[in-house]
Amino acid sequence: MKEFLTIREASHPEHLGRSESWIRAAIRLGKIQYEKAGNMILINRNEINSVMRKPPVISRKEMHNL
């Protein structure tokens, strides 16, 4: 099992089950912690499990950067 997942992998139903846009917005807002490896954004599996237990609320304004 991989320790880190990309945004695309994290968006799958067996993980977060949210859109890639939602995950990017949560990262931009500081609601999901991440690490960068070159130009890739990686999310630790422990962070994914934490978000699955208590998903952050992201308003429409926050989602679309209004």
Image (spheres, rainbow, N blue to C red):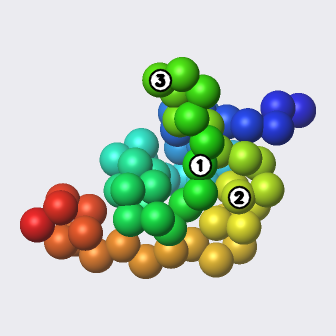
Quadrant (top left, top right, bottom left, bottom right) of the C terminus: bottom left
Q: Do the residues labelled 2 and 1 touch (CB within 8 Å)?
A: yes
Please name the residue that numbered disc 2 is placed on. Answer: 47
Which callout, 2 or 3, points to the residue nearer the camera? 3
Judge whether 46 appears above or below 30 on screen. Answer: above
Count neighbours of disc 1 (C-alpha within 10 A) and say few if under 14, some if 14 to 19, many if 20 or more. Answer: some
Give the labeled residue for mark 1: 34
Occupied quadrant, residue 16: bottom right
As drawn, is 20 to the left or to the right of 17? left
Residue at left 55%, top 60%? 32
> Which x, y percent locates residue 47?
71, 58
Q: Which residue is drawn at 18% across and 61% down?
A: 65
Residue 10 marker: none
Q: In 3D space, how far apart are the residues under numbered discs 3 and 1 (Cα atoms)?
A: 12 Å
Task: Please tell me which of labels 2 and 3 falls first in the chain.
Answer: 3
Quarter of image, res 49: bottom right
Q: Which amino acid does label 1 sit on?
A: Tyr
Q: How crowded is mark 3: few (under 14 residues within 10 Å), some or many (20 or more)?
A: few
Residue 37 or 57: which is nearer the viewer?
37
- Residue 2 position in % (x across, y down): 82, 32
Residue at mark 3: 39
In terms of sequence position, does the residue under pointer 3 or pointer 1 come before the other?
1
Q: Which amino acid does label 3 sit on?
A: Asn
Identify the amino acid type marked 2. Glu
Q: From mark 2 to mark 3, how far is it between C-alphas?
A: 20 Å
Q: In which quarter of the image is residue 64?
A: bottom left
Residue 57 at least partly seen = yes
Residue 58 percent location from the top left of the image: 36, 72
C-alpha separation, residue under disc 2 versus residue under disc 1: 8 Å
